[in-house]
Amino acid sequence: MPTLSGFWAGVYAYPNDPAPAVNFDCELLQSGSVVTGQITESHAPGQMLVANINGHLTGFNISFIKTYQTTHSNFLWEIAYDGTVSPKKDEIIGVWRVGGRQGTFNMHRDAGILRESEIRKTSNKKDIKVRG
């Protein structure tokens, strides 16, 4: 059965707020039921933020806490995420909460990076056959 480990792309939104949705990239690592990783996101031109995530996967339910790696007072919150993983483990949809605010998020495997990996593997196999 595949794990959640790998590269993901996603977006989180503020449904009841005029703030714009935020795109993010994520690398997840799954070991048993433990899920960790790192998220990078841009809130404004030239403002790249990095956050660590730590959580758990139980069946198709995932919960994790996102903690920004900054001292900027606007990002000193721990944000709780709860989501549902698709059966193919290629999409996660859910909600986030911090203080009295909440919103939605969704993320999917970053196919571009996966395709690049597959191309490299295929190229390496061809090289092996040619040399053999």
Image (spheres, rainbow, N blue to C red):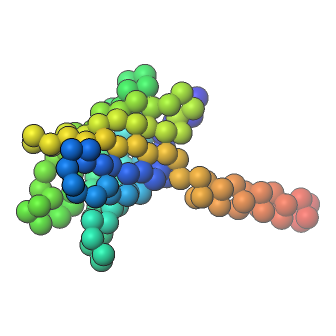
- Which residue is situated farthest in the top direction here? 59
Question: In screen coordinates, is 85 left or right of 124?
Answer: left
Q: Residue at x 15, y 58 (%)?
A: 75
Q: Residue at x 77, y 57 (%)?
A: 122
Circle count: 0
Q: Is residue 124 above or below residue 32?
A: below
Residue 54 is situated, as x and y percent measured from the top left of the image, at 29, 42
Residue 124, located in which quarter of the rendered image?
Answer: bottom right
Question: In screen coordinates, is 46 left or right of 116?
Answer: left
Residue 98 is situated, as x and y percent measured from the top left of the image, at 15, 43
Residue 112 is situated, as x and y percent measured from the top left of the image, at 60, 58
- Do we see residue 31 in this rendering? no
Q: Residue at x 11, y 61 (%)?
A: 74
Residue 117 is situated, as x and y percent measured from the top left of the image, at 64, 58
Q: Is residue 86 above or below residue 127?
A: above
- Do we see residue 43 in this rendering? yes
Out of 119 and 127, give the one closest to the viewer: 119
Question: In screen coordinates, is 45 left or right of 28?
Answer: left
Quadrant holding the C terminus = bottom right
Residue 44, located in which quarter of the rendered image?
Answer: bottom left
Quadrant holding the N terminus = top right
